[in-house]
Amino acid sequence: MKSRFAVISASAMVAAGAAAADDAWRAPGSAFGSPVPPFFDDQTAEVFRKAVTAPKATRSVKFKPFEDSGSSTLQLVQDEWTWRVNVTELALPRLPSNLSAAGIDKPSTFVTTYDLTWPAGGDISSALRGSSAPFCVTAFDYLFPANVTDLYKAADAGSTNCGRVLGEECLNALYVEGNNLDGDQCIVPRWGDISACDATLGATVRADPAGRPFTFGAATADANPASANNALNETSPVRSGEGIWTFEGGVLGDAEAARGYAVAAGRLQVFMFNTWLNITSGRASKPNVLCMRVDAAAEPAGTSPPGTTPTGTSPGTSTGTPTGSSAAPPRQSQAAATVVAAILVAVVALLS
């Protein structure tokens, strides 16, 4: 039976209760591909698309994902891919009339997108030289503590290697315990529970998000439209160079959006993908775990473990929280935050 990939938009909040629905459109989101928030009208959607395709900050890193895989497909072993992370902020020219009473001054947002480019062009099946195996991608939308983020230096900007930041023991554990490919299904791995990663990924998951405009969740999708277990294969597939994942900050005031953009540009991005590869004696898989900071020279604005204060801040303040505003988006209720965590943040529902 096919797995179902459920991406539920803000419009689905109506079913969760009117109070939550009123606030859900303000909340940050995380989604496979490059979707436009569903409450945007045509004019605002076009502004959003143009801003995403011409970002304020971007970084591209080349790597060979299958160089040491043992794949019997020589082209895959030799192929060089590019991972690009784009970050931008934009003013929103219009909001639907039913949301206009929200009272946000100068509505704005910030957006982060990931894209992958491969030499064969086309969709993921083409990238894998005709493979119909699942291509599982996992996005990790957490803010790392500043001391972890700062391990990724400007000198690392030409590499996707996470070993320097996460440590080799953690990285090796991710290949097994943190794998997002289970048989022919894509799963959401529980990276925060891996003991070898307790000081990095574990500390990140446990940290206090302080209401900042990120989803603070992980999500997985199968990006190969040829995969038999992929319920997305009836939609337009992601192609080489197109957005494979999008994080958006929700609707914010312009000062909050500017702060969110700065944090997003400087934060540590961690991205995993995995698939089955044909080898001489059958098939094998080993996840690619990629790390990057778009602005590696930026002062890291991370989170702190509960009960601690970020380095360089005074008690009661939190690095990265919008100046002159509450930590949470204006009037975002706890009910809305809970619903968003269950629906918009946990984008993926994998059902057998």
Image: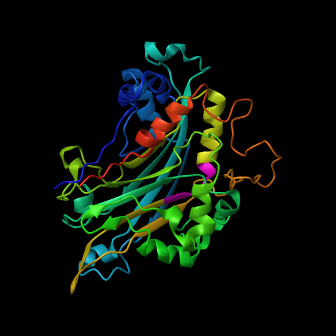
What range is drawn magenta here?
Answer: 265-270
Looking at the image, can residue 250 be seen? no
Residue 268, magenta (yes or no): yes
> Quick one: which residue is furthest to the right in this view?
314
Q: Residue at x 48, y 17 (%)?
A: 99
185 left or right, relative to 308:
left
Q: Residue at x 70, y 62 (%)?
A: 147
Vertical order, 151 against 327 (above or below) = below
Vertical order, 5 against 274 (above or below) = above
- Residue 190 on image: x %, y %: 46, 62
Q: How many marks?
A: 0
- Residue 116 on image: x %, y %: 38, 57
For the rendered model, the colour scheme is rainbow
Looking at the image, can residue 98 be seen? yes
- Residue 113 on image: x %, y %: 46, 47
Instruction: Say which quadrant the N terminus sits in.
Output: bottom left
